[in-house]
Every structure is written in C-alpha cells, then in structure tokens.
Image (cartoon, rainbow, N blue to C red):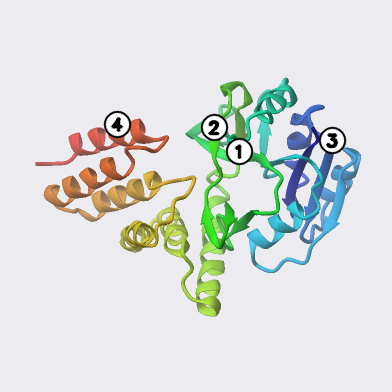
C-alpha cells in the first residue's frame, strides 16, 4: 500500500516546513502544487524531496486540488493545507493499512483544532474543534467541486455523493492556524469575490449559497448571512445534496445572525427546532443541541 501527500500552495514559506515535517515517515510521495510562489516555498518543498508541479492559478481551488490528485500515485491520499500540521502522526501508516482492508471505508475524518495565533500573547487561542476530511482512497471518481471551500465528492453514474467515512483516532489530530484573526477578513473578501465571479460566469452552483453564507458571516454581514444560510439549507434539501459538513454550520450561522439582528423569540425557536431535526444524524448533533440550549437561554423574554 502506497500513500501520497498532496498540497496546493502559494507563498507558504512560513508554514509549509512544519506541515511537511509533521507527516513523519508515513508517506511514499509528496506532491506540492505551486500556483505562483515568489518566496522560498519551492525551496522548502525541495528540501523534503517533494515533487513540485507548477499550476496556473485559475481562481478555482478545486481545479488546483484536482490537478494534484491527477498526479498522485498512492493508494491513499493525505491532502493538507500548508497551515495544517499533525500533532502526532506516529502510527498513521499502520492505521491506514488496517483501514485499507475494509472496502466500505473510503475516507477518514481527522480531528482538527482551529488555532488563533494572534492573541497578543504567547498563548494561542482555541477557536473551535471539528472533524475534517483529509484522507481518502485515491480513485478517479473522487474529485473536488466548488471554486472555494471546495468539497470532495464521489461521482457515480453522474450522481454526486460524499465518500463513506469513519472518524479517525483522536491521536491523529491536526492543528490549523489559517483562522488566525489577522488573516481571516482578507480571506473572506477574496473568497466572496471568487464566488461572485463564478456565479456571474456560470450561474449559481449547487453549493454557492453555503459558501456565500460562510463569507458573509466572517465579514459580519448578518443580513446576508441569514439569507444565504436559509437559502443553502432549502436548496440542498430540494436538490437532495448531502455534504460532509452537513447543516450544522449553516444553522449556527443563521441563528447567530438572527440573534444579532434581533429576531423574535418565536422565530428563533422555530429555526432552532429545524436545526435540531436536520442535524439529528450528523456528527455535530450533540453540539447543535448544546448550542441551541445556550443560545435560547441567553435570549431576552
């Protein structure tokens, strides 16, 4: 069994070395797709004996990720961002060798901790914990979709579905620093511009509303957040779309935006009931119930 590790990068000299080092001896090949670095990113990748592939940036993260997948030769792919690194990857190869024996296991969700380094002190801030899809079988039908917040889906008979996943052991936790407060506003504005351009050129895509909600929430535009969160939930239900992320984040955005805009208690309760029902079978179902309980308790009568 062979394992490929893939990255898409641009000017990541501050992050890439730590991420590559955290892989340890678990991978058989490193593929670094560079979309136009002008710093020492490529030199760092070379130091880790990575195969560097230059890719013209087309304002489409899925295109770049699929470009990397097309060059991966392993049976499994570990696809990380440069600002993600394993806290401990020891034993990951053996873990994947066990998973490889079960065909119904197509992918692994890794525990991920979003860390804010911009706290003004030596102590980093834990923003959130979640499970993120970072490892899967290397098959041609596994491809990314969406120009931003790209999503890995499996295409079978012209129908898209999420891969069949299991939660990996907690020891294989990733630290992610890409949500540090100093860089997020610029990221959200950039992603929003890409989405608006995609919609202008190709029309609204199946997951456009989901990603618009994410951007507007990050930029503090709560009216647009609520609009796109509700639209995303409605459209995805109607189209029969299921995603790795599910509806958890969308309902959180909608409820937090509603609180900021002064929704009535009756309306907040209505959305909350829908949120609990629609996330009943998701990984975050307990988090949703706890969030709703705290949110409703803090509302004024």
Which residue in the protein does label 1 denote?
A: 107
Evaluate whether residue 38 shows in this view.
yes
Relative to the observer, which residue lies in front, 295 or 5? 5
Residue 290, which numbered label? 4
Q: Residue 212 at x, y = what percent?
A: 44, 62
Neighbour class for label 4 at 10 Å: few (<14), some, many (≥20)? few
Q: Spatial distance from mark 4 to mark 1, Cα to Cα?
A: 28 Å
* Mark closest to the chain's N terminus, 2 or 4: 2
Residue 166, which numbered label? 2
Q: Residue 268 at x, y = what percent?
A: 19, 48
Going 54% across and 76% down the picture, which residue do you hit? 202
Q: In this view, does 26 lie to the left or right of 163?
A: right
Nearer the camera: disc 3 or disc 1: 1
Q: Are the residues at dot 2 and dot 1 in contact (C-beta closer than 8 Å)?
A: yes
Q: Spatial distance from mark 3 to mark 1, Cα to Cα?
A: 18 Å
Going 63% across and 35% down the picture, which residue do you hit? 103
Placement of the C terminus among the 4 image quadrants: top left
* Mark closest to the chain's N terminus, 4 or 1: 1
Relative to the observer, which residue lies in front, 275 or 97? 97
Q: Are the residues at dot 4 and dot 1 in contact (C-beta closer than 8 Å)?
A: no
Secondary structure, mark 2, is strand
Neighbour class for label 1 at 10 Å: few (<14), some, many (≥20)? many
């Amino acid at each position: 069994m062979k394992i490929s590790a893939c990255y898409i990068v641009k000017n990541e000299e501050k992050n890439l070395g730590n991420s590559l080092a955290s892989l340890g001896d678990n991978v058989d090949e490193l593929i670094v797709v560079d979309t136009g670095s002008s710093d020492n990113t490529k030199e760092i990748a070379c130091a880790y004996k990575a195969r560097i592939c230059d890719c013209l940036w087309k304002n489409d993260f899925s295109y770049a990720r699929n470009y990397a997948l097309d060059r991966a030769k392993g049976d499994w792919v570990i696809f990380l961002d440069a600002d993600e690194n394993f806290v401990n990857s020891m034993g990951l190869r053996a873990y994947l060798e066990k998973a490889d024996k079960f065909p119904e296991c197509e992918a692994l969700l890794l525990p991920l901790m979003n860390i804010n380094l911009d706290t003004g002190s030596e102590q980093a801030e834990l923003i959130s914990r979640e499970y993120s899809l970072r490892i899967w079988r290397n098959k041609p039908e596994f491809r990314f979709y969406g120009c931003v917040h790209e999503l890995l889906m499996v295409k079978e008979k012209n129908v898209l579905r999420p891969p069949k996943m299991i939660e990996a052991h907690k020891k294989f936790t990733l630290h992610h620093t890409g949500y540090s407060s100093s860089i997020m506003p610029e990221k959200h504005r950039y992603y929003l511009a890409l989405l608006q351009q995609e919609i202008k050129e190709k029309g609204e895509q199946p997951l456009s509303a989901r990603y618009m909600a994410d951007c507007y929430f990050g930029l503090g535009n709560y009216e647009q957040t609520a609009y796109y969160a509700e639209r995303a939930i409605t459209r995805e239900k109607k189209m029969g779309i299921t995603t790795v992320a599910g509806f958890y984040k969308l309902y959180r955005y909608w409820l937090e935006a509603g609180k900021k805009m002064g929704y009535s208690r009756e309306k907040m309760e209505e959305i909350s009931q829908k949120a609990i029902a629609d996330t009943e079978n998701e990984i975050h179902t307990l988090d949703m119930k706890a969030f709703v309980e705290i949110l409703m308790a803090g509302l004024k009568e």
